[in-house]
Amino acid sequence: MAEKVTNELIYEVLKSLQKGQMEIKQEISDLKFRIGSIERSASGMNDTLVHHTGLFDRISSRLDKIEKRLDLVDA
């Protein structure tokens, strides 16, 4: 009888551990999804930054040319 009780207790502990493990797996899966979303967002922000940097460089170049034409700076 004592052995049966011990086996049942062990079985309950194992079921509890298995449930906890499944919850951890689900949380890890959710975190992977969220990290993937963050990585995609960061990549998009980087692309936008590169685009804006190019725009600012062209604007700066055009402003330099305008200043030279108007003799606002030394040529």
Image (spheres, helix red, strand yellow):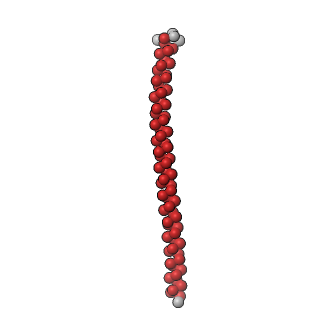
State how many labels appear.
0
Residue 74 appears in the rendering: no
* Up/down of 17 relative to 3, above or below: above
What is the x, y in percent for residue 57?
Answer: 47, 25
What is the x, y in percent for residue 72?
Answer: 53, 12
Residue drawn at (53%, 88%) of the image: 2
Residue 3 appears in the rendering: yes
What is the x, y in percent for residue 26?
Answer: 50, 61
Residue drawn at (49%, 23%) of the image: 59
Residue reaching furthest to the top: 71
Residue reaching furthest to the bottom: 1
* Up/down of 65 relative to 48, above or below: above
What is the x, y in percent for residue 31?
Answer: 50, 55
Residue drawn at (50%, 74%) of the image: 14
* Up/down of 6 relative to 63, above or below: below
